[in-house]
Image (cartoon, rainbow, N blue to C red):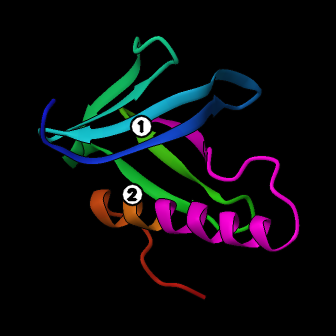
Amino acid sequence: MADRDFEASVGISHGVKVFAQAGRVVVSSGVVRLLDRAGGVIAESPVGEASAKVHRLGGGCYLTLAGTTYYLRFNIGVGARGAAALIAFRQRAKSGRMLQALLGGETERP
C-alpha cells in the first residue's frame, strides 16, 4: 500500500454501532478499506463498487462498501472552538468531497 490515493483519520459507524472512533479510510491500489485503530480491516471493496456522499451538516460522509453504508466523521479539529472550529468544519467537508470525487457519488454543491 505504498501508493495511496486517499487516506484520512475517521470515526466509523453503521447505524448505532460504532466500529472505531480513531479508524482510517484508505483508498489504494483500486481498493477502499475501512481500518480500525489497530489496522484491522472492518470492511473493504473495489473502488468500482464503492460510493461516497457528503453529509453536508455533519462534516462527514456516507460511504457504501459491498452494499453496507457506513458514516465517516473526519477527525479534523475535534474540540476546536470559534474560528478554528469553522476552519476544521471546512477541512472535514473538503475531505468528504475529495473522497466523493474519487469514488463517485453526488457531485453538485448547493
Q: Residue at x 47, y 84 (%)?
A: 108
Dot 2 and dot 1 residues touching (CB under 8 Å) = yes
At label 1, which amino acid type do we have? Val
Q: Was residue 94 drawn as part of the magenta stretch in this picture?
A: yes
Q: Nearer the viewer, residue 80 or 13?
A: 80
Residue 15 position within the rendered picture, expressed as x and y whole percent measured from the top left:
71, 32
- The residue singled out by tag 1 in the image is 25
**Direction bottom: furthest residue:** 110
Q: Secondary structure at mark 1?
A: strand
At label 2, which amino acid type do we have? Leu
Q: Was residue 97 drawn as part of the magenta stretch in this picture?
A: no
Q: Residue at x 50, y 68 (%)?
A: 94
Mark 2 neighbour class, 10 Å CA radius: few under 14, some 14 to 19, many 20 or more: many
Q: Is residue 57 above or below residue 16?
A: below
Q: Quadrant of the N terminus?
A: top left
Q: Nearer the viewer, residue 89 or 83?
A: 83
Residue 30 position within the rendered picture, expressed as x and y whole percent measured from the top left:
14, 41
| Quadrant assignment, res 67 | top left
Q: Tell which circle, 2 or 1, labels the residue nearer the N-terminal end.
A: 1
Residue 59 position within the rendered picture, expressed as x and y whole percent measured from the top left:
67, 60
- The residue singled out by tag 2 in the image is 99
Residue 7 position within the rendered picture, expressed as x and y whole percent measured from the top left:
36, 43
Q: Is residue 5 above or below residue 66?
A: below
**Extent of the magenta region:** 68-96
